[in-house]
Amino acid sequence: MKIAVLNIKGEETGRDVALDKEIFGIKPNEHAVYLDVKGLLANKRQGTVKAKERNEITGSTRKIKKQKGTGTARAGSVKSPIFRGGGTVFGPKPRDYGFKINRKIKQLANKSVLSSRAKEKAIKVLEDIDFEAPKTKDFVGILKSLSIEDKKSLFLVNGENKNIYLSSRNLRKTNVTTVAEVNTYDLINAESIILCESTLGQIKERFN
């Protein structure tokens, strides 16, 4: 599958690059994508919520009324769950929500999303960009040239120029990351994926 290389003005440079069929041309596996995204989001959960149970509440254990003859339900102490300020029954406790996803499942999920985006023609290849200094205005100009300023976009860069990241971090719909750090959630959350030309070799090396 061949795709034209664009410059920062959104114009074709006259060069084409071939996208690896084993990465950008497979049959997407939706279940693998589901498992990987579920695992990524689960691993981000802090799991620190905690509610006090009956034995952890500070309060008297004195029996507040007699057992029988009151015409109301029995009650043992003010720490009972039926009273305001009492303990919580089966309340949440700190826990780890994360679970392990096999490496091959993660690779299949990544390739599935890349293949889907390639089929939708939502992948563009951009010649390598280099900012001498961080400048958001210049980065916005690139987005407008590619007609993606109103879309969620993901830029995969080679990681050598930090100024590209600094120029884009204030843009709400734009995410800039490296091939080594990208994950399935980043890929599936983007409406348009922009690959810098120098990252194609890194993509082939990582996902194959």
Image: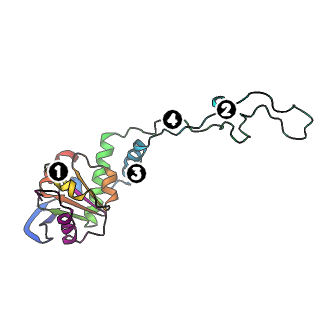
Q: In the rendering, which numbered label is found on residue 162?
A: 1
Identify which residue, 44 or 204, lies in the foreground.
44
78 sits to left or right of 7: right
Q: Is residue 191 above or below residue 65?
A: below
- Check the image and report above or below for 122 versus 44: below
Q: Between disc 3 and disc 4, whose residue precedes?
A: 3
Residue at 59% x, 38% y is 51
Residue 208 appears in view: no
Number of the label disc, if any, that sits on residue 94: 4
Amino acid type at image mark 3: Tyr
**Disc 3 versus disc 1: distance between alpha carbons?**
32 Å
Mark pair 3, 4: CA separation? 25 Å
Q: Quadrant of residue 79?
A: top right
Q: CA distance from mark 3 to mark 2?
A: 39 Å
Which element type, helix, strand or loop, lies under badge 4? Answer: loop
Residues at marks 1 and 4, CA–CA distance in whole angstroms: 37 Å
Report helix, strand or loop for mark 2: helix
Q: What is the x, y in percent for residue 146?
A: 20, 70
Magenta part of the chain: 128-155
Q: Is 78 drawn above or below residue 148 in the view shown?
A: above
**Residue behind mark 2:** 54
Say whether disc 3 or disc 2 marks the residue closer to the N-terminus.
Answer: 3
Q: Amino acid at mark 2?
A: Arg
Within the magenta stretch, is there residue 136?
A: yes
